Image (tube, rainbow, N blue to C red):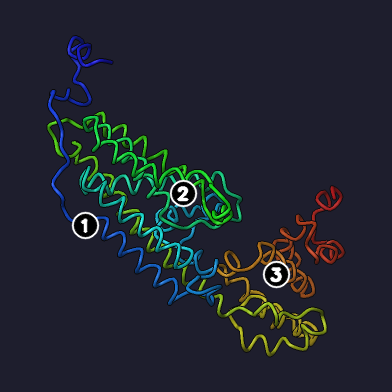
Amino acid sequence: MTTIESYHTGSVPICPPPPLQSTAMPASVFPVVTAVILIAMGVIFSAEVTFGVEPWTGAFEPSVTTLMAFGGLQYPLVADQGQWYRLLSAPLLHLDISHVLINGIVLWFSGRAVERMIGRSWFAAVFIIGAIAGGLMSLVVNAHNVVSVGASGAIMALLAARYVLAFHYEPGSQRQAMQSNALRLLIPSLIPLGAGHASGAVDYGAHFGGAIAGVIMAAILLACWRRRDTTPSRGRVAGAIVALGLFAASYSAAANAHEYRIYNLQRQLIPASDIPRDFAAIVARAPELFKQYPRDPRARFYQAVALVQAKDLAAAETQMRIGLAEQDILRVLLVPTAKGHLQAYLSLILTDEGRMNEAREFAKAGCLDSSESLQPALLEAGLCDAKVSSAR
């Protein structure tokens, strides 16, 4: 719809028609928002290094578990467990010292230019939308076991927006310089060029998602940017986006603090090298492991096995119930089948105690999982539904 047609129909155009006059870059101001984001990135990376839930995997390189504990992005956590707030935390996390330094340098040079161009509110809005879009695209294109972190999606949004927004200015060396500077960083970030790019460690999904969001937002701003204005109008819209983003980020910080406490329990789990390899080792080492790692549901399971051998079924049942009560550890830190295995063993204990109805309730997961090692014992004890067992 053209502006003239809008006047004929009596409707109000979304953006007022620009007067025919030249534009100029706004006066240079200190990039406050860019600086705040950089400080946040530095502080959070320092926290990753200092308070990681596992030792570094390299020089100033937090482990994958630490990144997940701090809010790294992974498909099962977002899609299956509803932890959408990781879309707000992952952009401020970084893989290692080189990752945060490179992103910080690019953000400083691109961010201060875009912040000067469109103002602090719209700059923050583009950064937030670009970060979220980059995260969403990362979830779509990456394998489900990939953990994604970094501000590159938001940075790509700023670079793409800078290229598009340069069309607001008159053709000439100024526009050309802005667009060339943007493309100089944008193109290599979207296309793997040369062997020097570790494509396995670069989240091109986040890069493309952020760049697409940057183009769309810049096109909207460009349509509404009156030539007589130094920065785009509709500042209240930008303010609303930023306010919602800050609210979501605050919620994300609180939710990730809870997740961090769960992941930090990793320290209280039995190391893989100490896991008993056979039944005899379980019985022999159960008291020692139970004493050293009382929060580990597996230690409770080993203790229950030893107690069953000692004919103390009541104490064994108590240990299994305490182990199953560690819901957060079972959900996050152990393999998905751990809970079902513990429930299956508890059902066998309850069977030996003559409590068949309770036993069948706990046996359900094991009866449905053909990979469950205790399923033959469940079938033999008559704890599995006849239709389920015959179907297998």
Q: Badge 3 is on which residue?
A: 342
**Mark 2 vs mark 1, CA separation in Å:** 24 Å
Q: Which secondary structure, mark 1? A: helix
Number of marks in picture: 3
Quarter placement of the N terminus: top left
**Mark 3 vs mark 2, CA separation in Å:** 35 Å
**Which circle's residue, 3 or 2, is located before the other in the chain?**
2
Q: Is residue 69 above or below residue 164?
A: below
Q: Badge 2 is on which residue?
A: 135
Q: Please name whichever residue, 333 or 284, is drawn nearer the observer in this view of the structure.
A: 333
The residue sitting at 75% across, 81% down in the picture is 276
Q: Say left or right for 173 vs 155.
A: left
Q: Is residue 222 above or below residue 143?
A: above
Question: Which quadrant of the figure has residue 324?
Answer: bottom right
Q: Please name whichever residue, 119 or 175, is drawn nearer the observer in this view of the structure.
A: 175
Residue 101 % position (x, y): 39, 63
Q: Are marks 2 and 1 in contact (CB under 8 Å)?
A: no
**Which circle's residue, 2 or 1, is located before the other in the chain?**
1
Label 3 CA crowd tier, 10 Å (few <14, some 14–19, many 20+): many
